[in-house]
Image (cartoon, helix red, strand yellow):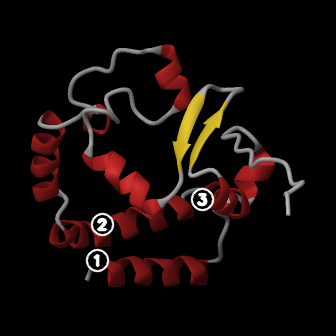
């Protein structure tokens, strides 16, 4: 039996697709695992195993131009040090350095301060009762540990 359904279509700028992309992504995985969008001239790889193979073959599938279509199309020269736009071995070196700074333990240490900052930001300019402000201040103290 021949399918009469139109070929899958993915448009990264389509708000309707973006609101619920999962049906489109499933169709891409099932029907077009290597998808080409003629309108914007890009390829998309949609199956996990294929994506994983592309990620380790960085010489062919480079991250040096990023993953944002507008940046890639503009052929912008990325300034050095933006490790998201780097390929190995420079990317690997920068990632190792950052992984020391953003270890799970260090991020957990930052959390109480971020909570205090976020609560204070929400309270600044909010019209609340004295009781609510007191309760919020207790929360801030509790978050501080």
Whether residue 23 sits left or right of residue 88 in the image: it is right
Q: Quadrant of residue 29?
A: bottom right
Query: Which quarter of the rendered picture does the C terminus lie within?
Result: bottom left
Instruction: Identify the mark at residue 144; answer none if there is no mark.
Output: 1
| Residue furthest out toward the right | 4
Question: Residue 95 placed where, x, y %?
Answer: 17, 47
Which residue: 16% across, 72% down? Answer: 105
- State the residue position of label 2: 113
Give the alpha-carbon distance from disc 1 to disc 2, as whole Å.
7 Å
Foreground residue among 85 and 44: 44
Question: Residue 67 placed where, x, y %?
Answer: 45, 36
Q: Relative to 104, does residue 45 appear above or below in the rendering?
A: above
The secondary structure type at the circle numbered 2 is helix
Which residue: 41% across, 15% down? Answer: 76
Question: Residue 39 placed where, x, y %?
Answer: 71, 26
Which residue: 31% across, 33% down? Answer: 60
| Residue furthest out toward the front | 1
Query: Marks 2 and 1: in contact by CB < 8 Å?
Result: yes
Which residue: 74% across, 49% down? Answer: 8
State which tag comes first along the sequence, 1 or 3: 3
State which tag comes first along the sequence, 2 or 3: 3
Query: Marks 3 and 2: in contact by CB < 8 Å?
Result: no
- State the residue position of label 3: 29
Question: Residue 131 placed where, x, y %?
Answer: 59, 84
The secondary structure type at the circle numbered 1 is helix
Q: Relative to 123, does residue 52 appear above or below in the rendering?
A: above
Badge 3 local density, few (<14 within 10 Å), some, or many (20+)?
Answer: some
Give the alpha-carbon distance from disc 1 to disc 3, as whole Å.
46 Å
């Amino acid at each position: 039996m021949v399918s009469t359904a139109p070929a899958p279509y993915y448009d990264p700028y389509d708000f309707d697709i973006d609101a619920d992309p999962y049906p489109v992504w499933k169709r891409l995985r099932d029907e077009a695992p290597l998808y080409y969008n003629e309108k914007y001239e890009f390829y998309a790889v949609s199956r996990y195993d294929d994506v994983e193979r592309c990620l380790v073959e960085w010489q062919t599938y480079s991250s040096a131009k990023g993953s944002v279509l507008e940046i890639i199309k503009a052929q912008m020269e990325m300034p050095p040090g933006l490790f998201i736009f780097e390929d190995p071995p420079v990317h690997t070196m920068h990632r190792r350095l950052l992984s020391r700074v953003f270890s799970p333990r260090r991020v957990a240490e930052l959390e109480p301060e971020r909570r205090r900052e976020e609560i204070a930001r929400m309270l600044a300019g909010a019209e609340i009762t004295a009781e609510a402000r007191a309760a919020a201040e207790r929360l801030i103290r509790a978050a501080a540990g």
